[in-house]
Image (cartoon, rainbow, N blue to C red):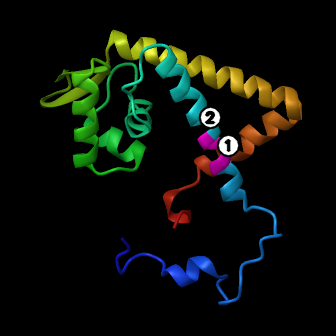
Amino acid sequence: MRDSRTIPDETLDRGSTGEEPDTNRPPSVALLLFSAYRNMESRIFGALARAGFGDVTPAQGRLFRGVRPGGSRMSELAEGAHVTKQTAGFLVEQLERAGYVTRVPDPADARARLVKIAPKGTAAASIGAAVVAEAEAEWAALIGPERMAELRDTLQMLWDMPDQWIT
C-alpha cells in the first residue's frame, strides 16, 4: 500500500514526462550496481544456509558487517547500516539470541554497551568473506585485474563521498 510520500503508480508506469517508458534504453548505473549487489547477496546467503547459518537475514547481515573487531556501539551500527537505533537494537537482539553477537560493557563508558562478534558470528563471517573473495576473483577474471582495480577505486570514491552529496 502506498502512502503520500511514495511515487504515484502512474509515475512508475510512465517516464517522468508522462510518456510510455523507453524499454530499449540501457539500465541505469544504479540498477546495474543493485543487480550486482543482489547477486552477491544471494550467493552469500545461499552459502550461509548450506553451512547451517540459514537463520541470518540480509538486514541482520548489513548490520553485522559493521561490527568492528573491538566491538561497536549501537549508534555506530545504526549509522553504518542506515537504520534507526531502534531497528539496530531489534536486529542486534535477534543476532544475540541466535548466538552471532554478544553485548558487553563498554570499558570507556560504563553506561554504554558494545556489540561484539561471537564465535558463531566469526564462523559465519568467514564463509561470507570466502564467497565475496570468490565472486570478486570471478569478476576480475572476466573484466581483467586492471579494470577490476579501477572499478573498486571508483566505487570507493563514491562510498567516501560526504553525505551532503547524497540525496
Kind of residue at disc 1 = Ala
Given contact means CB atoms under 8 Å apart, are the residues at marks 2 and 1 in contact? yes
Which residue is painted at 36% across and 26% down in the image? 55
Residue at x 64%, y 82% (from the top left corner): 14
Q: Residue 15, percent across and down?
A: 67, 82
Q: Amino acid at mark 2?
A: Met
Q: Is residue 105 left or right of residue 68?
A: left
Where are the magenta residues, as a range? 34-38
Asked if 24 appears above or below 17 in the picture, the reply is: above
Q: Position of residue 152 (x, y in %)?
A: 72, 38
Secondary structure of the residue carrying tag 1 is helix
Q: Is residue 2 left or right of residue 25?
A: left
Name, please, the residue furthest toward the bottom.
18
**Mark 1 surroundings within 10 Å by alpha-carbon count, few (fewer than 14), some (14 through 19), many (20 or more):** few
Along the viewing direction, whichever of 43 and 118 lies nearer the viewer: 43
| Above or below, comparing residue 143 to residue 49 in the picture | below
**Main secondary structure found in the magenta portion:** helix
Say which quarter of the image contains residue 52: top left
Q: Which residue is mark 2?
A: 40
Does dot 2 land on a helix, a strand or a loop? helix
Label 2 crowding class (10 Å Cα cut-off): few <14, some 14-19, many 20+?
A: some
Q: Which mark is residue 131?
A: none
Looking at the image, which residue is at 54% across and 26% down?
A: 46
Which residue is identified by label 1?
36
Pick whichever, 6 or 79, lies toward us. 6
